Image (spheres, grey):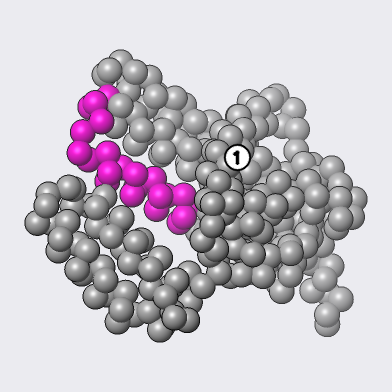
């Protein structure tokens, strides 16, 4: 049981590592945020599930469920807020960007 | 009667939360039920979040299906990030696209925006009226209708049943 839990936790750690490589390799804020949000969400969830499996589904599994729920609610909201703030602060998208409908619409309003 | 559904859902929600935190001792259960009902009776007129949720068997089944689809998409999006990050050429083709949503309820829209953020290659940047602006890491669609179909539809058809 401990081994299975350790493997799941290791998988979570692998996703977190990939996310941080993504932070280094991606060209601009928005792409970095994409890599960061997704991997950190699943990475933390796998960590928590690994703990639950490793210690054999005791009482604290309820608390782990609550933690997973809160991670799922708060993680996307924080990245959405950061991306929105970055866009309105005027941080440019990378050069290979295809199009930017939001900027077009804002300029159309003025 | 107008507030009954809201009151009922809030009580159930608070009680489940209490159950998860406190465990299943008989005395704690009784206190939990009493306090949940008391709190939701006091607060029911000020809370409008639960107004949109429908209570029916179909909505319940759709919730289950939705959670399964969401989990699959979350895992897919992680492998998608892994592929893009480890590929030597860094295959990205990013852009901010505009999509339309049919959902009317606030809670449904929040859940839809969160789901979009956690699915492969998309990140919600801004919401204005009926439109979402989405940063898409690999733009494959030209106009609003096509991108709406690709990004929003797979979640929206279930959320429409749950929230109406």
Residue B151 place in picture, x, y as percent: 74, 49
Query: Within the image, what quadrant is residue B14 found in?
Result: bottom left
Q: Is residue A98 left or right of residue B122?
A: right
Q: Is residue A52 left or right of residue B66?
A: left
Q: Residue at x 23, y 27 (%)?
A: A55
Residue B159 place in picture, x, y as percent: 63, 56
**Secondary structure predominantly adopted by residues drawn in magenta:** helix
| Vertical comparison of A49 with B65: above or below | above
The secondary structure type at the circle numbered 1 is helix
Q: Residue at x 45, y 56 (%)?
A: A74
Chain of the residue under the numbered disc 1 shown in the image: B
Q: Bounds of the magenta span?
A: A54-75
The answer to whether residue A30 is visible is no
| Vertical comparison of A52 with B149: above or below | above
Nearest the eye: A20 or B19: B19
| Residue wearing tag 1 | B69
Nearest the eye: B40 or B108: B40
The answer to whether residue A65 is magenta is yes
Q: Residue at x 90, y 50 (%)?
A: B142
């Amino acid at each position: 049981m401990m081994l299975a839990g350790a493997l799941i936790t290791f998988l979570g750690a692998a996703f977190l590592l990939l996310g941080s490589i993504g932070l280094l390799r991606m060209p601009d804020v928005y792409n970095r945020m994409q890599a960061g949000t997704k991997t950190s969400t699943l990475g933390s969830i796998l960590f928590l599930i690994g703990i639950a499996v490793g210690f054999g589904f005791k009482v604290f599994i309820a608390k782990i469920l609550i933690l997973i729920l809160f991670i799922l609610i708060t993680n996307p909201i924080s990245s959405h807020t950061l991306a929105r703030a970055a866009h309105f602060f005027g941080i440019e998208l990378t050069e290979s960007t295809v199009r930017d409908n939001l900027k077009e619409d804002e300029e159309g309003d003025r | 009667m107008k507030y009954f559904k809201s009151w009922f859902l809030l009580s159930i929600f608070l009680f489940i939360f209490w159950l998860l935190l406190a465990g299943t001792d008989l005395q704690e259960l009784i206190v939990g039920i009493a306090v949940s009902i008391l709190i939701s009776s006091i607060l029911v007129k000020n809370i409008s979040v639960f107004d949109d949720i429908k209570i029916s068997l179909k909505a319940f089944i759709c919730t289950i299906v939705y959670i399964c689809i969401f989990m699959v998409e979350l895992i897919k999006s992680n492998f998608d990030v892994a592929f893009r990050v480890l590929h030597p050429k860094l295959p990205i083709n990013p852009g901010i696209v505009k999509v339309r949503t049919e959902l009317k309820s606030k809670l449904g829209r929040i859940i839809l925006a969160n789901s979009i953020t956690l699915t492969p290659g998309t990140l919600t940047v801004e919401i204005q009226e009926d439109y979402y602006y989405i940063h898409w890491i690999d733009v494959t669609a030209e106009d609003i209708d096509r991108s709406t179909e690709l990004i929003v539809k797979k979640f929206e058809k279930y959320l429409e049943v749950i929230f109406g």
